[in-house]
């Protein structure tokens, strides 16, 4: 066949539009049209280069339907995290508690008192909604919240140390997920980084020797996502704060994760809480809202009133400000901490960390039973879950997973099929086997997992 003959086998745009529209429900016409155009163009290309002799109309229609289906779903949507990483940065870090969702609906879909003082009907401040709570929970004098912790560090440096030298240990020049690096954020905020000590050891005398009339602050950075072990020494907060005080300088602690509760009853020791850092004399402590705190993405700054007041006056604050949905869910999460026992039960991040292995095992056995019921070959295996999100890198949580084998489907293909499910399921491949780690899966998600695997199995038959 000639090129022209091959191309003539393509159906007309209007004919395709009629067929698709009669089946597509109430999807916007513009969307349907552009998908058909794109799919037709693709097909035309294949015919032109002779990859195909004539148009297979059914194949074309199936392609169009699949693409319409894909495009008519929201791009950002919920997934099931079966990867066993509790604060998975790529999967949105902390899961919010059920209590947050009602508040998100109420503040997001209605008017609110975001910047309105209900006592006297005058203008209010958005920062007021959580400041008292943060002060109560951390023992600090004042608090301020911004878009994320990177913004918090930036605002602190810009407001408190602008143009001056900031002293940091060489062991703490952290990079978090590529885009946040302590040296770069310093440069961006216009202050000058002064490195002291060595990678493995920094002593109090290193800080004192570096202080001059150009110094603006002493900064301590939590080495969130790595650990230096062996022959090491770091200057802890009480001592760093004392050196800062003697030299009339602010001490700043970028704490990263922001633990609000002592997790040692759950086997996680050695991580200081925000309140402890404040008690140890840090003038300013900043941390994320969506790491160990278990709330929405936010940057929280607590500390001395004079510094917080300077930040509230900084014009940068407008560019870094927190939005109302974040504030609504942050307030609810912080309120849950007023009763620590309730916090561990109702904040998903804490609940997952505190889960006893026997509970995870029981979930794994229940899911394996349900999957076996739809003809899936699987077994329960011991695994290790992680906290993730650059928190507690040395901690492994005893966990259990359901390992799945499928005749005629490689672990990689199975993994991608589960990822393409209408509710995407993010699994893990360990020892050349697909595993669903139950540490991060809740029982109410079982039905969707079973349905997905049932469909995969029937597709193979
Ligand atoms: C995670 C982290 C940050 C960045 O926080 P985001 O909330 O992700 O912006 C900054 N510093 C440290 C030490 C961190 O662990």
Image: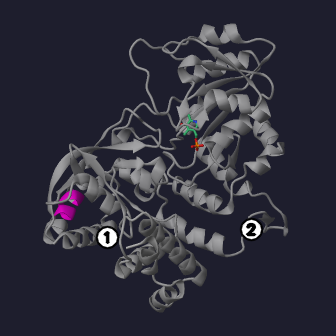
Residue at 50% x, 46% y is 291
Q: Nearer the viewer, residue 50 or 2?
A: 2
The image quadrant that residue 176 belongs to is top right
Q: Position of residue 262 (x, y in %)?
A: 45, 40
Left or right relative to 220: residue 159: right
Sequence-first disc among 2 and 1:
2
Residue linked to disc 1 = 448
> What span is colored magenta in the figure?
363-368
Residue linked to disc 2 = 113
Residue 154 is tagged as none
Q: Nearer the viewer, residue 72 or 126?
A: 72
Residue 365 magenta-highlighted: yes
The image quadrant that residue 326 belongs to is bottom right
| Residue 220 higher or lower than 261, as above or below | above
Q: Using a 10 Å C-alpha cutoff, classify the residue at mark 2 as few (fewer than 14 neighbours), some (14 to 19) or many (20 or more).
A: some
Residue at 55% x, 23% y is 172
Residue at 59% x, 22% y is 238
The image quadrant that residue 443 belongs to is bottom left
| Residue 259 higher or lower than 412, as above or below | above
Q: Using a 10 Å C-alpha cutoff, classify the residue at mark 1 as few (fewer than 14 neighbours), some (14 to 19) or many (20 or more).
A: some
Give the quarter the ligand 1 occupies.
top right
């Amino acid at each position: 066949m000639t090129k022209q003959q091959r191309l003539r086998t393509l159906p007309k745009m209007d004919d395709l539009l009629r067929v698709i529209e009669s089946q597509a429900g109430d999807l916007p016409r513009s969307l349907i049209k552009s998908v058909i155009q794109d799919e037709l163009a693709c097909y035309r290309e294949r015919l032109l280069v002779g990859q195909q002799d004539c148009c297979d109309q059914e194949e074309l229609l199936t392609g169009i339907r699949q693409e319409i289906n894909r495009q008519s779903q929201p791009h950002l949507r919920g997934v099931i995290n079966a990867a066993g990483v509790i604060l998975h940065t790529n999967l949105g870090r902390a899961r919010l508690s059920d209590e947050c969702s009602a508040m998100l609906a109420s503040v997001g879909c209605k008017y609110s008192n975001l910047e309105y003082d209900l006592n006297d009907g005058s203008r209010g401040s958005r920062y007021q909604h959580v400041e008292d709570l943060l002060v109560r929970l951390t023992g600090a004098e004042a608090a301020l919240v911004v878009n994320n912790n990177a913004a918090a560090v930036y605002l602190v440096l810009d407001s408190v140390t602008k143009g001056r030298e900031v002293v940091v240990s060489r062991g703490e020049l952290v990079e978090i997920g590529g885009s946040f690096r302590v040296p770069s954020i310093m440069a961006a905020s216009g202050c000058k980084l002064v490195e002291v000590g060595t990678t493995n050891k920094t002593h109090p005398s290193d800080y004192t020797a570096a202080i001059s009339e150009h110094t603006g602050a002493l900064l301590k950075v939590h080495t969130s996502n790595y650990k230096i072990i062996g022959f090491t020494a770091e200057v802890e907060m009480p001592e760093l704060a004392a050196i800062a005080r003697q030299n009339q300088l602010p001490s700043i602690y970028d704490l990263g994760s922001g633990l609000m509760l002592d997790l040692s009853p759950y086997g996680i020791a050695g991580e200081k809480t925000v309140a402890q850092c404040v008690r140890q004399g840090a003038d300013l402590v900043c941390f994320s809202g969506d790491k160990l705190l278990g709330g929405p993405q936010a940057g929280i700054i607590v500390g001395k009133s004079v510094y917080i007041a300077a930040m509230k006056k900084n014009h940068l604050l407008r560019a870094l400000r927190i939005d109302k949905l974040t504030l609504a869910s942050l307030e609810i999460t912080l309120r849950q901490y007023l009763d620590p026992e309730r916090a561990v039960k109702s904040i998903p991040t804490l609940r997952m960390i505190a889960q006893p292995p026997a509970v995870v095992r029981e979930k794994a056995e229940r899911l394996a039973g349900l999957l076996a019921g739809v003809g899936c070959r699987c077994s329960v295996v011991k695994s290790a879950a992680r906290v993730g999100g650059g928190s507690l890198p040395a901690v492994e949580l005893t966990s259990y997973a359901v390992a799945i084998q499928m005749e005629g489907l490689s672990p990689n293909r199975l993994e991608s099929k589960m990822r393409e499910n209408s509710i995407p399921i993010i699994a893990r491949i360990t020892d050349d086997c697909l595993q669903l780690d139950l540490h991060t899966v809740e029982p109410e998600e079982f039905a969707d997992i079973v349905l997905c695997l049932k469909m995969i199995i029937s597709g193979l038959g």
